[in-house]
Amino acid sequence: MGSETETGAETGVVVRDSSTEEDWKSKPPYRTTPGNEPFDKKWTAHCHCGRVKYWLSRDKPLAAKFCHCVDCQALHGAPFQWAAIFEKQDLHFEKGAEGLAFYHAPDKTTAHRLPCKVSCAYCRSPIMDEGRNMVLMFPGIIKFGDAERRKLFDAQCHIFYSQRVVDMHDGKPKWSKLDGQSELMKEVERTDSGEHIVVGQARNENKND
Ligand SMILES: [Zn+2]
Ligand SMILES: [Zn+2]
């Protein structure tokens, strides 16, 4: 493992933004200062090894979706990914940015550069995708207690369904790419003879779901 060359070096451009380099650690969702005192802990989550722990202050996500894109397949080692959207201030990490690893996919660097994927630096459990204003949590590590409570995090739709490796028959809207900005796809089932038959219409063509 030793030394690693950052891919950004390929371009010959070295970005050093010293003014904001450490700034982000003192802002949500990473700040650990007493400024957090009114934080209302509605949900608790911790990574597989337990080194990363966080709380959520909102009852349920603003939205939740399943993403079938090839990047999620590669980075999650799974056929698709389940993400729940929160605002950064809804989230509080027990140890701030400590123990977290970052990955900025566009230039394949491990710097904290937005948008980035955040995982436990030790066990590598995926924690969230951090965007500029919002985060997409991966709810697999939230302690729901029971299936009824987990329903609050149910996904409303599938995105990047055109890149799927598995067909879903759950009646939820299936967008070819981003939701609201791409084609809605129909549910298709394969018969024993290998034919494809349409078993349902994408549901929310009137977007009034
Ligand atoms: Zn861990
Ligand atoms: Zn994806």
Image: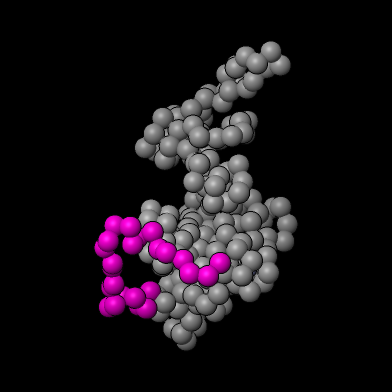
Is residue 169 positioned above or below 4 on the image?
above
**x and y percentages locating residue 178 in the rendered image:** 42, 40
Q: Nearer the viewer, residue 148 or 106?
A: 106
Can residue 31 be seen at all in this image of the molecule?
A: yes
Nearer-the-camera pick, 125 or 159: 125
Q: Residue at x 33, y 62 (%)?
A: 9
In the image, 95 versus 89, the foreground residue is 95
Position of residue 141 measured from the top left corner of the image (x, y, whole percent):
64, 61
Is residue 166 placed above or below 20 in the rendered structure?
Answer: above
The residue lying furthest to the front in this view is: 2
Side of 130 where 147 appears, left or right: right
Q: Is residue 60 left or right of residue 108?
A: right
**The N terminus sits in image quarter:** bottom right
Q: Main secondary structure of the magenta part?
A: loop
Is 132 situated above or below 201? Answer: below
Residue under the image location 42 percent in, 57 percent down: 108
Q: Residue at x 55, y 74 (%)?
A: 99
Furthest residue to the bottom? 34
Say which residue appears at 49% left-offset and 50% top-offset.
63
Instruction: Give coordinates of residue 36: x percent, y percent.
Output: 47, 80
Residue 68 position in % (x across, y down): 53, 40
The question of residue 23 being in magenta is answered with yes
Q: Which residues are magenta?
A: 1-24
